[in-house]
Amino acid sequence: MMFFVSASTTEPELAAALASLEEQVNLQARQRLGEAPPAGWMDLAIVFVSTQFTQPVRLIVDKLRADLGPRVLLGCTAEGVIGQNQEIEDAPAITLLGASLPGVDVAPFLLLPSDANLPALTWSAHPPAGQPDWHRLLLDPEEFRRLVDAPENPELFILLGDPFSTPMDDVLMAFNACYPGVPVVGGMASGALRPYGNALWVDDQITFEGAAGVVLAGSLEVDVVVSQGCRPIWHPLKVVTAHRNLILNLEGRTPLAWLQDMLPELSEEERLLLQNGLFIGRSIKPGQENLGRGDFLLRGVVGLDQNTGALAIGDSIMDGEIVQFHLRDALTAKEDLEMMLVPQAFRQPPSGALLFTCNGRGKRLYDHPNGDISVVQANLDSAHLAGFFCAGEIGPIGGVNFLHGHTVSLAIFRPKSI
């Protein structure tokens, strides 16, 4: 029988925090099973730890493995974590999602190409010697598949990465090439201000760089929801000339010329929202007309050259793409997440869920706490859930996996229908 448990704690003292997690998990398992849970019942445990507990993370990993006995343990440190019904920011906290997954293969993996001796990964005060040779790994599909070692017909990859050391855009390109159509969800560890400050772990291995994950295959169904929280303005335009991350010409005119025409036609509210930043949506559906929300991959506008009229965005772009300007605010973010979750009302209640949200959301975006989790749980019947505030969110758009910003990426789990 597939079932999930979730637990979170804001106990500032580590021993009390771990005891609270264990008590919550065992109580929920007993309630679900009607008896004390048997040893080894937990196939997967995913744990997110606030940065206040970074130093004792070895103790946390060892204690959870010893006391709960999960077959696979995955997690990372974060500047804020998310429990079943609350977002915990600026406070010591640990959150956990545990699952019994009969008929499901759960296979852990590490992506840490380096000149260092990789099998000896342990918690250390010093970074490993050598530099990651990502180029070799990501251009060698056979080596990439060997390291990931996914079971046949994978349903989902859950991926956590360190933002200082992992070229996640390239890593996701490798996933898209080697496992086309298989969703990857997750996020980049957050909270550290410098390299080797974030911790990631899978089973008993802890590292400060690279990426860690698990692949799930077998008797489960996964829905993935990616809400970018933007709304389009103006109308779609075709890129005539682009170079790397620069848009030089849109339908025969410079981007600046189009912006100068657009501004007077915006409402006062929309002009105020420009203070939150301007975004470019890249169409993921070439040739389709009547584009709207969900049809674009959103990227931030990072610069505008007043002399040439060129626009710089936070991604590479190619000639011939269709783009549209977008705005973002708290109301739009809430509405977009609600809209993306509407189909869940027509399905059976989920068994569990994982929530990855941007560290620029939370109280930074909303004028109240629990902005995203309240919307999610209103649509998921208070499913067992855990998550964290990411320095970049991972999820698919149009069947292709991307690294996002200011986004919610949500994985929803159910038993496979017979």
Image (cartoon, rainbow, N blue to C red):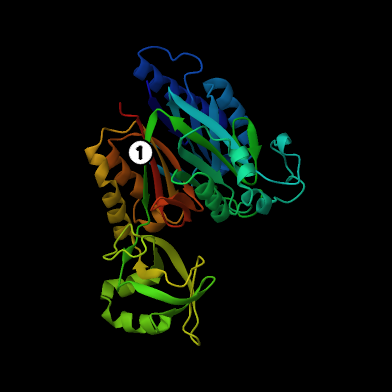
Quadrant of residue 240 in the image?
Answer: bottom left
Question: Image quadrant for the N terminus?
Answer: top left
Is 241 or 407 nearer to us in this picture?
Answer: 241
Whether residue 286 appears in this view of the structure is yes
Residue on which disc 1 sits? 85
Whether residue 33 is situated above or below residue 260 in the rendered picture: above
Residue drawn where x is 28% and y is 66% of the image: 289
User: Whole-percent x and y of residue 248?
Assistant: 48, 79
Extreme bottom residue here? 307
Extreme top residue here? 35
Is 268 or 187 nearer to us in this picture?
Answer: 187
User: Whole-percent x and y of residue 172?
Assistant: 53, 50
Whether residue 370 appears in this view of the structure is no
Is 19 or 357 nearer to us in this picture?
Answer: 357
What's the residue type where badge 1 is placed?
Answer: Asn
User: Whole-percent x and y of residue 180?
Assistant: 47, 46
Tell me if 258 is positioned left or right of 138 in this view.
Answer: left
Residue drawn where x is 54% and y is 55% of the image: 169
Question: Image quadrant for the C terminus?
Answer: top left
Secondary structure state at the residue bearing disc 1: loop
Is 408 or 257 nearer to us in this picture?
Answer: 257
